[in-house]
Image: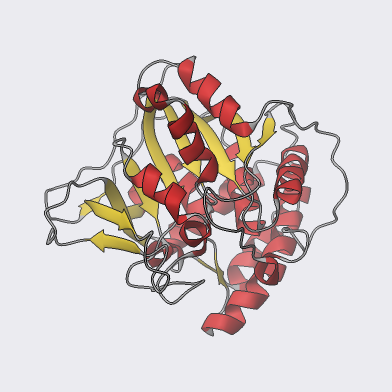
Amino acid sequence: MRSWRFVSVLARRGGASRLADANPMTRPIIIDCDPGQDDAIALLLALSSPDELDVLGITTVAGNVPLKLTQRNARLITELAERGGVPVHAGCARPLVRDLVTAEEVHGKTGIDGVDIREPRVPLQDRHAVDFIVDTLLGAEDASVTLVPIGPLTNIAMAMIKEPTILGKIHEIVLMGGAMREGGNTSASAEFNILVDPHAAHVVFDCGRPITAMGLDVTHQVLATPQRIEAIRTLGNPVADATCAMLTFFSRFDSEKYGTAGAPLHDPCTIAYLLEPGLFEGRLCNIAVEIHSELTMGHTAVDMWDVSARRKNATWVHAVNADRFYALLAERLGRYG
């Protein structure tokens, strides 16, 4: 495994912090996703950055659309990026406890509506995603692999439950999920990824490894406005064209829902953080997930002011330089030209 180092959050107890810049050496990661247009763009951003990110594998879970579509979509994206050597593994087809909830009304029937859909040439790996995660971590050095879950946390929680010794192999978990000041986008108080499998989220947030959480508080600041989409379109390569097509479709739902000029680009925030953490601001605090009340199921209780005295288990990211975020995205997508 290639060596790498990373300077993580400079957090003061009880205070906000600017997230530090990363060392340019390569960081090994596993991306767990449920594509989804924003998942697809997160994958394209990661796959454009091999000097910084060594994508050991992509695992898929049921979420935005059912598993048979998320695994196909992930393979289509690796093919679009001409990174077919990155293995794609299908994982859990339903949450740990609850029935599956999907989001075709947002993402379309395919999950990545806006681009042409076909059966990809890139093969689906035989090994189950949970087994891939477990086996990869067991074979890694201690605290060496970063997990990047950008869908429901079912696969990650199942891997932790199946083989608890993998926890020591995880350097950090950088996830997209949760909401605090923004409220919920699927229920009154819960964000989609957490609400789909709150029990899995409870397992992950309680695992004891460092977590950086990109919730709606930050992702709602990176809107795919028409001007930003047009700036990507001018790159003039097939990946940029596909990104614009997906963003144009994706924006129509949230623009109407929120009355904004574009949709929040949720999942790529995780990859942007790995590439340029200085774009973001966060606070180390306690985050707990509601798993008992149907009224607030999947709510992320973010203790920003340490009123609960519970162990600080995650960095809650709450601010981003959106213009620099889109400049980074455009620069990396331009590499595909």
Locate residue 293: give its quadrant: bottom left
Vertical placement of residue 65 versus 121, above or below? below
Residue 48 visible: no
Vertical placement of residue 21 versus 330, above or below? above
Locate residue 265: give its quadrant: bottom right
Please give left or right for residue 276 compared with residue 304 in the image. right
Residue 150 visible: yes
Decide which of 303, 85 is in the foreground and name it: 303
Residue 179, x across and y down, in percent: 38, 65
Locate residue 37: give its quadrant: bottom right
Residue 118, x across and y down, in percent: 88, 49
Vertical placement of residue 236 versus 74, above or below? below
Q: How is the image coloured?
A: secondary structure
Tell me which residue sits at (34%, 46%) in the image.
Answer: 205
Decide which of 325, 96 is in the foreground and name it: 96
Residue 84, x across and y down, in percent: 75, 31
Tell me which residue sits at (86%, 35%) in the image.
Answer: 121
Tell me which residue sits at (68%, 26%) in the image.
Answer: 127
Decide which of 312, 294 is in the foreground and name it: 294
Residue 264, x across and y down, in percent: 53, 67
Tell me which residue sits at (33%, 38%) in the image.
Answer: 207
Question: Which quadrant: the C terminus?
Answer: top right
Total numbered circles: 0
